[in-house]
Structures are given as C-alpha cells and as structure tokens.
Amino acid sequence: YDQKVDMSQVEKGKGYYIKYNKLAENIDIVRKRLNRPLTLSEKIVYGHLDDPHGQDINRGVSYLKLRPDRVACQDATAQMALLQFMSAGLPEVAVPTTVHCDHLIEAQVGGVKDLARAKEINKEVYDFLATCTAKYGIGFWKPGSGIIHQILLENYAFPGGMMIGTDSHTPNAGGLGMIACGVGGADAVDVMADIPWELKCPKVVGVELKGKLSGWTAPKDIILKVAGELTVKGGTGAIIEYKGPGVESLSATGMGTICNMGAEIGATTSVFPYNDRMGAYLEATKRGDIAKLAKGFQKNLLPDQGAEYDRHIEIDLNNLEPYINGPFTPDLATPLSKFAEEVKKNNWPDELKVSLIGSCTNSSYEDMSRSASIAEEALKHGLKVKAKFTITPGSEQIRATIERDGQMQTLSEAGGVVLANACGPCIGQWDRTDVKKGEKNSIITSYNRNFTGRNDANPATHAFVASPDLVTAMAFAGSLTFNPVTDSLKGADGKEFKFSDPSGIELPSRGYDPGESTFAAPPESLKEREDIAVAISPDSDRLQFLAPFKAWNKEDPKGCPVLIKAVGKCTTDHISAGGPWLKYRGHLQNISNNCLIGAVPEGGKPNELTNLMTGETGTVPQVAAHYRDNGKPWVVIGDHNYGEGSSREHAALEPRYLGGTAIITRSFARIHETNCKKQGLLPLTFKDEADYDKVKPATYVDLEGVKELAPGSEVTMVCKDAKSGEEYARIPLVHSFNAGQIEWHRAGSALNLMAAKAKA
Ligand code: MIC
Ligand code: SF4
C-alpha cells in the first residue's frame, strides 16, 4: 500500500496521494502506547493525529489535534467560511478543498427551469464563490452539479481517509469507510490555514448488524431504527461504528445513507469497515486503483479483535421492519406495521399531499431503480401517483444515468416531477403552492430531517421520513395509512393488486454517465491566481466583508438581560432559519434579522419578546439589537441538545453580532457548541439540569468566574428579578473550554486569535 494513488480522479497529477503509510505508522505508535486493541474509527481518527507520540488520548475527555485529508463546503456555509478565510490573509488553502453549489436552488416547476432561475437570482453569490475559490486554489462545483455529499461520495471519499465539511451530513462519506465530520466554517478555516483540527476524543458506539436485508426493508430503516433507539442526542460525542455479518448485505451507497443520517442523532460521525461492496462502488466510479490499494490495507480498515465500545447495539436485519419517523423530529420511530394505528391515534392528517424522493440521503442509482420498480408496477395497473411526487437526483451523474437507463422516464410517466440536482425542498427551497400556510397536512420524504417548518415554512405540515421505497409506494395510495406490505390498491381495471417487493440495481451495468461537465478546477499557478479579484459590491444585500468582533473586556459580564428563555426543541433551524433566509448567508447584518425567531419563549409566542429595559414588545432581533446598542450584553437560556441539526455557524455568529455574551443550556449539540466558542460566545451548561426551571424569563444575570475561566472551572450565574432587582438564585454553571479555546474567548473570536498570530 505504499504506491502513489491519487486521493481523487478529479485532482490527478496534483500530488494529493493517499497516505496509508503514514496512517499505518500512526496506528502502530498509538496501539503500542495504549497497549490495547483499537476500534475501526479509533484507527482512522488516531491515524490522523498531528502528534501521535505526545497526544493525550482519552475517549470522551481529551481534545485531539487532527490533520484531515480534505475540506468540503457547500454554498450556504462556504460564503461565511471563505469570508473568514479571506480575513486570515493567506495566499491559498493548505489542504485540498472543494465548494459545492447546491443549497440555493429553489424548487418551483422542475429541474431545468429552476436551475436557470437560480443562476440568475444567485449570480452575485455564485460569482463570489467562483472567483474566491479560483483565487485560493479551491475546486468549484457549479450549480447543477449536485448535492455536496453525493459529489463527495462519487469523487473524493476514500476508505481510511479523514474529511471535514461545513455541513452536518458530511458523515455520508462513511459509506466508503471515511471518517467525515460536519463542522462550522471557522473549523474549516483552521484546516485550510494549516492549523490542526480540534475534536473532543470521540466515544465509540458499536452497532452489530446480523442477518440480511430483504423485502421492503432498506438501509434507511437501519438508521431510522437506530435514531428511535438513541434519540436525537444519543450519539453526541460518539462515532457510530457499524460491523457484523449484516454489513455484507448493504451497498456502499446504502451505507452512505445510514452514515448520513447519523447526524440526526448528534453523532460525531458514522463509519463502516472496508468491504467488497465499497470496492465495487469505487470501481464503478472509476477508482479501481483506490479499491485495490484499500484491499491491500484492509486489516487497518477493520476493528481489532476484542476492541472495546462505550455502548453496544445489535440489530437483526432478518427481523427489521421498515420504519417511518416523525412528525417534527427524526427520532420518533414507528414500525410500518404500527404506523396506520399511530396516524389515527395522533390525529395526523391521513391524506398524503406530497411524496418527495432523492436528496443527499437517498438518491443513489439503487434507490432510484428501486423506486422505479415500484412505479413500473403501478403503471402496469394503469395507476399514476395520487399525491404530488418529486424526484431530486443527488448529482448530475445520477440524473444523466437514470435518464439514459429509463428510470427517470418511468418515474415521470407515473406523474413524478424531476427537480434540480440540489437540496431544494429538503432545506425549504420549495415554492410550495398546494396548501396554504397554517393548513394542517402530511408529506413524506426520503430525506433526513423533518423539524417543524423545515421543508415549506408551514408549521402545520407534518413531515415524515422513510425509505424511498415507502415514499414512492405511498404516493400511489395518497394515504399515510397505506401499508404496501399488507394492503392492496385498486388498479385502473378495478382489480385489486398488491405491490411486489421492490427490486433495484446496485450499480449501472453500463457504467455511470457523467452528464454535463460542472466542475471548475482552480488555475494551476499561484501567479495566475494572485491576479484574480474577488468581487463584493459595497451595497450588496447578500455579501458583506466581516468586521472582527471586539476582544473580551476582561470583566465578568454583569446585569445581562435574559434575551429569551427558550423552551423545548431549539434546533439551528429555530436559531437561524433556512428557506428564504439562505439568501443572506454571506451577509451577517442581514441574516441576523432571523436570529432565534423560531425559538419558543417560556410563556410566550415565537419572535415576540418584552424588552426588559423599555417594557415594550419587539421581535427577538429587535430586542437583542436594542440591548447591544445600549451596552447590555445578553444571555440565552436553553433546554437540552440546544443547536441540534445543522452545522451553520450563523447560529453562533448572529447572537454574537447582536451582542450576546453567553448561551446557557441543559446541553449542547457538538457542532453548535464549538461554533459558539469559535465566535467568542460562552456556551455554558447547568451543573444541575434542574436549575433550568429556576430561571425566570424576566431576569438580569451576573456571570461570576469568567475572569478566572480555566479548564474544568465553574461559573456562577447570579439571577436578579428584572422588576425588583432582587437576587433570587445563584446557579452553578460548567463549561467544556480547554486552555486553547479560552484564548478564543479572550481574543473575541478564534479568527481574531489566528489573525493576531499571523501578524506576529
Ligand atoms: C441542513 O441539512 O440543515 C443543511 C442546510 O445542509 C445544513 C447546512 C446549512 O445550514 O447550511 C447542515 O446540515 O449542516
Ligand atoms: Fe442538502 Fe438536505 Fe442534504 Fe442538507 S440534508 S445537504 S439541505 S439535501
């Protein structure tokens, strides 16, 4: 395995080789030091340590410094990441990096027209990304190329590699045995600037798969079931490592689906051991050389005998039923056989309005051909879809291949509308017209997330997630209570029929059709790149240069109003909504107008707060800005798993920009907690969870102990009634800052610190 094999076909000849030698050497060093067997993820993670000799390794405790092989960004997060990289003042990125245009394309009528429209509407942003990537030596995937995670799987993911991406579903690449993690833009900037990436040493959850998938059960059902078991925060701080004989019955893209949705349980990432199904996918995507190399390296791409896991789960695929998860949260898992009953019991709208297949989670050739097999059978019985039905190909390559091989035609004939190769309705880029806002209705998708209002900005939409097979079958029934395993449908001839089990083709027998060329490599020479001007118009409402945040004033924060005490789920969609707001992802001032507008204040309505200083009512951003402009740093009080969901650092940048100083919660989602630290906020947690209940919304707080902030130290929150000014509680808080991260806080942000160091 010491041959020179390129990490990616796309970067052939650039000298970016797979470094299995280095990986093996590091694994050896660490194994000797720890003197115990290692899990698969430990091998890959520790194999990428910056200092394998000296690094303190303690699962769930120590912070690791790592050297990822690559960085990937999507357009909605890349803008902020690149703006930050630009302020670091470096000539080019230190590790291979790509940017993918996928989030800004709105679904309206169909792929071709929607793409053309998006190119026009987003011209300014695309131009910025195109010039900025070219200047700094970054590969650029143009709009229409497809969804970041599908492109990464097709071109860049490789077994044993490590990648970070500014999107929470980056773990999708675990389907090819890569350790791939979602991060905020500031983390990506570190790696682009040759600074090691810091990660809390992950715990490891082992999932043993027994038996074999069959019938209506698809890879998606494995993760839907795991999500039900572990819940949205059960994977926090852990890598989910799949193993066991059942792995053999999964295609590489199926494994990708499972890893992708590990994001929904908060896992750091998910990964599968190397096997021949991965080899077959690498061959099919013209990377036979990588498959051969990996095969020779296979013993390092499997867990050691006797490796220990922090938690263990077993799933028998022989008995695994299809699952449907939702509404409003991806961990509410119901097996198909119980689903109709649940629909009735909970009064979920039975009529199915829209079925949506595809997305980064489920748009492989196999997924599409299984869905087409179902549609074909329905067509034979003279049926077309009853619900609306949309198909989102994950990439231009998938689109072109299913067009050539006929699946697309079958799905369209059945009444499906093929959308652009982009995120579209998955991230609220959906000009939905079939129901009115506020109207209760049901939709089902093969996507991964279903938070309130995510797809269509209608909080009354009940969104469910399932395998593309179920989503397709249900489109023909037009009903949520239809169970294709047991129920029949009436054909056009009046005769009843039951669907056969779906069948699919794992990989196209004629190879993939690449479709239109959508990639722009950066110019080779630094000289040529230096001359490229990155354009940001000063009166743009979509792009704005970043001004550095102020350094900490060296005082304990005093008299800080509680801006909002958020109750219940507060995801990144609640803190910084998607959909129409994606437009402002490169303009901090404008996007800050969505800050926390979806969060539910205790005893109140979203986006309606009483300003403690004036007694007047205002929106969250208005009240926040008023406090800031009157010299009052404020705090947020939140519940469990605060900031779950997306990697978007806007959820941390906005509160910081609007004058927030601390976010105090029962617990945080990993990426969001790091994002807060990087932007100079103080993410703090209640030492005793029950203290959350003690905080009254109308409160001013002092934070004692910020001056003495040190790893493991405590901060005391002194709560004073906003009216009487009387102290009513002293609440101990804890934090997870290490010494280096405390420096970020002192400097005002991690970026400030980087800039200061670069100057020195
Ligand atoms: C998502 O699925 O929520 C997104 C949109 O892909 C985000 C990234 C973003 O907010 O831009 C993610 O998952 O990280
Ligand atoms: Fe895009 Fe949806 Fe995938 Fe996020 S989860 S990358 S929005 S398709």
Image: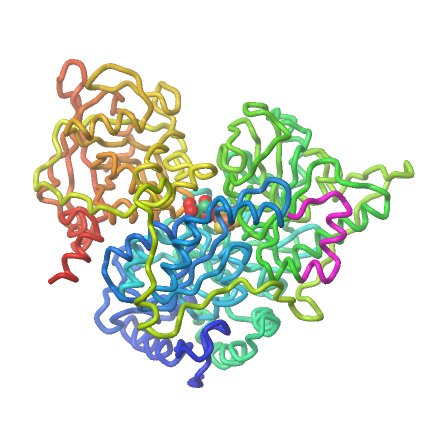
648 on left or right of 709: right
Q: Residue at x 38, y 69 (%)?
A: 43
- Provide residue 611's location: percent of width, then percent of height: 25, 20
344 on left or right of 592: right
- Relative to 606, is 99 above or below? below
Q: Quadrant of the N terminus?
A: bottom left
Quarter holding residue 144:
bottom right
Residue 358 lies in the magenta-colored region: no
Main SS type for the magenta part?
helix
Pick whichever, 395 or 30, lies toward us: 395
- Provide residue 697's location: percent of width, then percent of height: 27, 22
Segment tinted magenta in the rendering = 401-418
- Provide residue 178's location: percent of width, then percent of height: 45, 65
- Provide residue 234's location: percent of width, then percent of height: 42, 46
- Residue most toward the bottom? 3
Q: Is residue 331 visible?
A: no
